[in-house]
Amino acid sequence: MIDIVDPVRCEIEVPISISEAFKLFTEGFNSWWPSDYTWSQESLESISLASCENGRCTEVGPNGFQVDWGRVLKCHPSEKIIFTWQISPNREPQPNPQKASVVEVNFTMINLKTTIVSLVHSGFEKHGEGALAYRESLNSDYGWPFILNKYLEVAKA
């Protein structure tokens, strides 16, 4: 049994309203998620994060290839979204939700045109062997901080 692994925590300030920030994170997911961070890579057709409970987190690649990489557990528009992270430490889809970690994203209004987006990725121990290295990878400059920076770039545009 693997010990509890500390969560990854990231926070970013975006220059858009709280409702726009939530909408960009969910409905606009395909516009900012880096294709290098997908199974399909350069042949990615689309990637999505549903904005409803029990909604699918799905990637579509060439020739209709489709894979679910998570499921929305809770969704409170303009407030928070929680979804499973069903991607193994080997960066392969993990169909078993019992072996998934969880990502929680909270949106906090600073003023009408500024929102703080706080992300907590927890439960790495559920990924089994390689969980600690996986956590370190997602906590590195090329993990969640890099990914959220792509989100910020689109929010600024």
Image: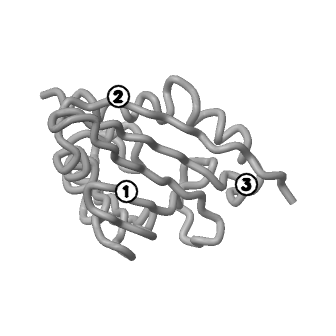
Camera-side mark, 1 or 2: 1
Which residue is situated farthest in the left direction here? 157
Eyeballing the image, is 129 above or below 52? above
The image position of residue 65, as x and y in percent, is 32, 64
Tell whether label 2 touches label 1 (CB within 8 Å).
no
Q: Which mark is residue 149?
A: 2
Which of marks 3 and 1 precedes in the sequence?
1
Q: What is the spatial separation of the Cα atoms under label 1 and label 3, in whole angstroms?
A: 23 Å
Kind of residue at badge 2: Asn
Judging by the rendered image, the residue that carries numbered circle 3 is 125
The image position of residue 41, as x and y in percent, is 35, 42
The image position of residue 104, as x and y in percent, is 47, 54
Q: Which element is circle 3 on?
A: helix
Of the pair 106 and 128, the residue shown nearer to us? 106
Kind of residue at badge 3: Glu
Which residue is situated farthest in the top direction here? 141
Eyeballing the image, is 111 above or below 128? above
Kind of residue at badge 1: Lys
Instruction: Please give the name of the residue rendered at 83% of the width and 52% of the height, measured from the top-left corner.
Output: 3
Q: Which mark is residue 12?
A: none
Q: Which element is circle 1 on?
A: strand
Judging by the rendered image, the residue that carries numbered circle 1 is 80
User: What crowding class fits label 1: few (fewer than 14 Cα within 10 Å), some (14-19), or many (20 or more)?
Assistant: some
User: What crowding class fits label 2: few (fewer than 14 Cα within 10 Å), some (14-19), or many (20 or more)?
Assistant: some
Instruction: Identify the image's colour scheme: rainbow, by chain, secondary structure or one colour.
Output: one colour
Q: Is residue 104 left or right of residue 76?
A: right
Which residue is situated farthest in the bottom direction here? 54
Tell whether label 3 touches label 2 (CB within 8 Å).
no
Which of marks 3 and 2 precedes in the sequence?
3
Q: Which element is circle 2 on?
A: helix
Instruction: Please give the name of the residue rendered at 21% of the width and 35% of the height, measured from the top-left corner.
Output: 111
